[in-house]
Image: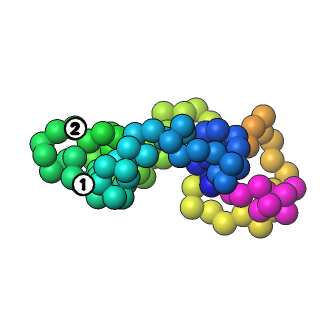
Amino acid sequence: DSLAKGVFGGDMHELSMKSCFPNLWKLEKEHGSIIYGLWKTRTKKKKPTVPLYSFSEGMEMLTRTLTQKLSSKIVLEKSVQSWGEIDADLIISTLPSYAVADLC
């Protein structure tokens, strides 16, 4: 649901898998499941139908690199009870909207 809302801005129950994710739809139809289809296409020494991406040191590498490269202050691994007084032009949060609403 979050992928459908984030990419297509719609309700996942109203969107077509075939039109939104045609490669995944094809894998499921040809192999019975998306995971098995990805596995099956990788074992044939071919590129998978849907490319898979990762970082050599895991997903944390993305956050760590952004923290090092950006001049902005990035706060990680802290629980938030309230915003308090913050001098900022922009706050980016990965919290669900209901949790952010409670903080405001």
Is 99 located above or below residue 26 in the figure? below
At x 80%, y 41%, the residue is: 87
Task: Count how many numbered circles sit on residues in the image.
Answer: 2
Marker disc for residue 89: none
Q: Position of residue 36 (x, y in %)?
A: 29, 58
Marker disc for residue 39: 1
From where the camera sits, is residue 28 visible?
yes
Q: Position of residue 34 (x, y in %)?
A: 37, 54
Query: What is the crowding at mark 2: few (fewer than 14 residues within 10 Å), some, or many (at least 20)?
Result: few
From where the camera sits, is residue 35 visible?
no
In the rendered view of the protein, which quadrant contains the N terminus? bottom right
The magenta-colored residue range is 92-104
Q: Residue furthest front?
A: 29
Q: Nearer the viewer, residue 51 or 104?
A: 51
In the rendered view of the protein, which quadrant contains the C terminus? bottom right
Q: Residue furthest left?
A: 45
At x 58%, y 44%, the residue is: 16
Q: Nearer the viewer, residue 21 or 1?
A: 21
Q: Say whether residue 94 is left or right of residue 98.
A: left
Alpha-carbon span between mark 2 and mark 1: 11 Å
SS at badge 2: loop
1 is within the stretch colored magenta: no
> Looking at numbered disc 2 in the image, what kind of residue is underneath it?
Lys
Q: Position of residue 4 (x, y in %)?
A: 61, 46
- Label 2–label 1 contact, CB within 8 A: no
Is 77 located above or below residue 51 in the figure? below
Marker disc for residue 47: 2
